[in-house]
Amino acid sequence: MNCRCVIACALLVGAAISGLGAQSAATLTIDVNQPKAPVSPTLYGLMTEEINYSYDGGLYAELIRNRTFRSDWSGILNWFLFEKGSASAKIAADDREGPSLALTHSVKLEVIKADAKSPAGLLNEGYWGIAVRPNTRYAGSFYAKSHSDAALPVTVALVADQSGQVLATATVPVTGTAWKQYKFELRSGAAAPSTENHFEITVDRPATLWLQLVSLFPPTYHDRPNGNRIDIMEKLAAMRPSFLRFPGGNYLEGDRIENRFDWKKMIGPLVDRPTHPTTWSYHSSDGMGLLEYLEWCEDLQMQPLLAVYGGYSLGGQAVKPGPDLESYVQDALDEIEYVTGGPDTKAGALRVRDGHPAPFALTYVEVGNEDEFDRQRTYDGRYAQFYKAIKAKYPKLQVIATMPVKGIAPDVVDDHYYKRESGMFEESKHYDKTDRNGPKIFVGEWATREGTPTPNFGAALGDAAFLTGLERNSDIVVMAAYAPLFVNVNPGGMQWSSDLIGYDASSSYGSPSYYTQVMFRSCLGDRTLTSSVSGGGDQFFYSATGSSNKVCLKLVNATSADQPITITLHGIGPARTANVGTLHGNTIWATNTIRDPKRIVPVSSKLNIKGEVTPYSVPAYSIQVMEIDLR
Ligand code: AHR
């Protein structure tokens, strides 16, 4: 060991020992009756886009994968020819036969030989299996036409992969040579819940059958047709989000202009939606269209935060401001009218046609996404053109810019943060000195990126530290949303790691970061309280907010040693009991998984506060939310 190494190693050992040792005591002083600044009532919300199989194979409850029979060199994706016993059949993509202008193709099934014991048809693998639960009703439909006018019995079934057991079945007579929609219902019996199942659609005689848009839904949240998975919606409801930013993110922009979120192609009956490729390497069924997003907002009492396509696509195409951009601006105005217009407006009437007579309240519209990536630097002009047109028709709308702009003062600017834990500790101070006379801030995407597929406890500590900074500055930071929200944890399901909620075909789980947000949102109030801290390490973070009847205290100890602290609550009055929620990990790598979803969950306890001064200790690696009732 040379001399330089001896010194360096001694320093390292010293640092490691001090990391393990006791934290210097902190003093936290809060004046319960001294509000400092308002807290935004919309601070906590959600951001969503089609990424990581967020909708298809995720929130959107459709069970059939590739229900519109797209194919490539390998054949029809996710569908397989099924010939039982002595049956003989073939399947092929047919580009000349389809039920609508949007779906001009189909699958052609030619059954050469089949009988009741030896049927033939197609099998769908679902999204990494199909969840079948006992005594459950599944609502299905398909479009079909046959080669003859005679009734052709078509059997649909949910079948267990391993045993071949038929878990639910129905037979639908397909009649005639014209395209028609057929509906059916499947009911499962007492079988144990499982995801190792597939869907079969078969015939028991020689025939030719064309099929398109084969769909199957389990029960959905609030029983919505074409609706959402119940378990995932319940997890979102527990976050009590105030808004939903949709539809992106990169998904809004598309790699190319023609692959953007083109809202007009994502409304109305599913058969009129052409589907489209996404920026995230897979194809979207577009079942989650504009109205479905809005109904999702309605179900969770969130306000929609509508991002409109701003004329820039990820591959680098930017529409020049001026006449070239006009049609995109008009599209955005029409989209806003679809959301907010009455039945007497052109686009509002479309929403009524689609089954939602009542308009939706809208406050925020965002123009584009991350336009700092536009190398041609056209955003100043594009934003101004959208801004003026939107304000002319909808003066009350707040128009969010995706980056600082020149020439026009945006109402709100959207900032994004994706960093490691230490980076988020730093960013917790980001807005402490922001000019209060400038635009308001929307942190439209943020996450501590450590852990895959979902964040680990170290990431939750980074998140919690960052959130204390947002709460402290929520007079200027009016809204914030973590991203990405979802990930399907099956192999190939993830395109972006560290996602808030993970799932497979049947179950879902919250990451430590998810529980951090549930806890932070559970106690917020309407004001920050005058407070100060001294002592304590640089990995101790806090926020003090409240209302006339409660104090909300967030304490984050991101170190491996307990943090002693004296909490002084001036004006707290008589003895109080605080409800304390604690999220704790044994290490920063500790995490939840689909198989072990509850390792790190909030634990409740009580703390007696006997007077203004409370000696306390924030446990190592822990995030705490204290709610003190002042009534
Ligand atoms: O959240 C994942 C991606 O990160 C979003 O689509 C994009 O806006 C950002 O770069």
Image (cartoon, helix red, strand yellow):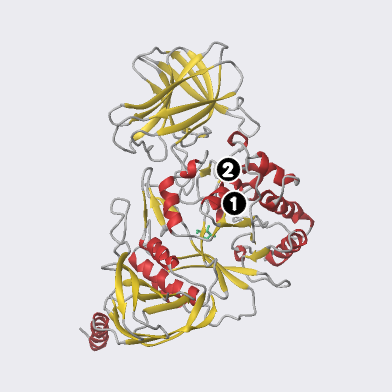
- Residue positioned most to the left: 1
Residue marked by disc 1: 254
Determine whether label 1 and label 2 are within 8 Å by CB: yes
Does residue 309 appear left or right of residue 93 in this picture? right
- The quadrant in which residue 355 appears is top right
In this rendering, the answer to whether 326 lies above or below 357 is: below
- Check disc 2 and report the residue beneath it: 276
The image quarter in which residue 250 lies: bottom right
Q: Nearer the viewer, residue 188 or 401?
A: 188
- How many C-alpha atoms fall within 10 Å of the one at disc 1: few (<14), some, or many (≥20)? many
Q: Earlier in the sequence, mark 1 or mark 2?
A: 1
Ligand 1 within 8 Å, label 2 CB = no
Q: Residue at x 73, y 55 (%)?
A: 329
* Residue 564 seen anywhere in this rendered image of the structure: no
Write the residue at 58% across / 15% down.
176
Tell me the element at label 1.
Answer: loop
Q: Indicate the amino acid at tag 1.
A: Gly
Estimate the x, y position of residue 31 in percent, counting from the top left. 45, 85
